[in-house]
Amino acid sequence: MMESLVGQKVVIDLRSKYVCLGTLIGIHADYLELKNADLHDLRDTDTSRENYVAASKSTGIKRNRRKLILFRREIVAMSPLDDVVDD
């Protein structure tokens, strides 16, 4: 299933107060690789995780990393950005 997301823009919810959006480019035993990623610290804003992700879907990913490695043990959920429901 995860392999089908390679090359797509994804939303990754993490155990911490972070959410990550970007293009999934690699899946490895312990980590995922993304490019043109936005690693967003939800403690820096009053916006909820859901509202931030919905806004990113409509306005585009606000890239702050060219490449990003995410440890799989920190991931709670992942889905294609296109699957985000904003209504």
Image (cartoon, rainbow, N blue to C red):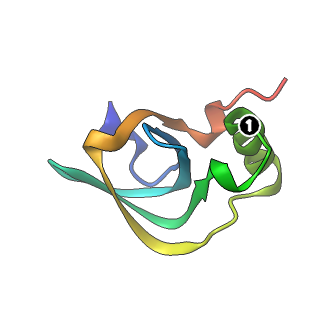
Residue in the foreground of this view, choosing between 23 and 74: 74
The amino acid marked with disc number 1 is: Ser
Instruction: Find residue 61 and report its horizontal and vertical position in percent.
Output: 68, 59
Q: Residue furthest left?
A: 29
Instruction: Find residue 70 and report its horizontal and vertical position in percent.
Output: 34, 55
**Image-based side of 21 in relation to 86, left or right:** left
Q: Residue furthest bottom?
A: 66
**Image-based side of 1 in relation to 20, left or right:** left
Residue in the foreground of this view, choosing between 6 and 12: 12
Residue at x 18% of width, y 49% of height? 30
Q: Which residue is labeled 1 in the image?
A: 48
**Image-based side of 84 in relation to 73, left or right:** right
Residue at x 73% of width, y 26% of height? 85
Instruction: Find residue 6 and report its horizontal and vertical position in percent.
Output: 39, 50
Residue at x 64% of width, y 48% of height? 42
**Image-based side of 14 in relation to 64, left or right:** left
Residue in the foreground of this view, choosing between 28 and 69: 69
